[in-house]
Image (spheres, rainbow, N blue to C red):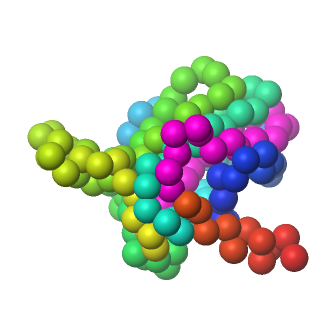
Amino acid sequence: MNPFCPNDGTTYNFYLAKDGTETTGTGDSFGCLSSHKGEQWLYIRIDTPGEMKFLTTSIADHDYAVWGPFGSKDLAVAACGSLPDPVSCSFHPQAAEQVNVPNSDCLGGTPNFSSCTQNVQAGDVYIFLIANYAQEDQALTTVVAPDNTAGYNCQDVIDILN
């Protein structure tokens, strides 16, 4: 699982673009993703609490799912194979997605709206699966949404680039 940091203008390549890789035979719930070809499993670290909102764009259709929060990357990896429903998910035929991750009080059959602040917390780790449904060689660019208030810990991405 590689790090992902949704900073403005950051570009990632779909390195599994055309091989059709798709996880099957696990206990993972993929939520809205009826298909997740060309998938890439990434993780996002939260640095400061707030609302996690960012946009992803590419030249062709891509989709996503987000699971969490987890207390560490190791706990996120350990959960793979038995992931519950994603906390955020989109399966639409478009080349742009808006990722919005609510906190756990906003989820479930009867959300507790009195504490539904939609804030992620410092130290949280989220699994971010990006599916390259179009199976095209393409780049994915991220832009932090104007109403995003969360801060992202990008050190793991910086360490890879250096």
Image position of 32 with respect to 13: above or below: above
Image position of 84 with respect to 158: above or below: above
Q: Nearer the viewer, residue 8 or 66?
A: 8
Which residue: 51% across, 29% down?
91
Q: Is residue 59 left or right of residue 53?
A: right
Query: Does residue 107 appear in this view?
Result: yes
Instruction: Say if the magenta span includes residue 74.
Output: no
Which residue: 68% across, 42% down?
143
Q: Nearer the viewer, residue 49 or 128?
A: 49
Q: Is residue 134 left or right of residue 35?
A: right
Q: Which residues are magenta?
A: 126-150
Which residue: 45% across, 70% down?
122
Image position of 162 with respect to 133: above or below: below
Query: Residue 83 appears at what percent x and percent y?
Result: 37, 58
Image position of 70 with respect to 110: above or below: below
Query: Does residue 33 appear in this view?
Result: no
Quadrant where the C terminus lies?
bottom right
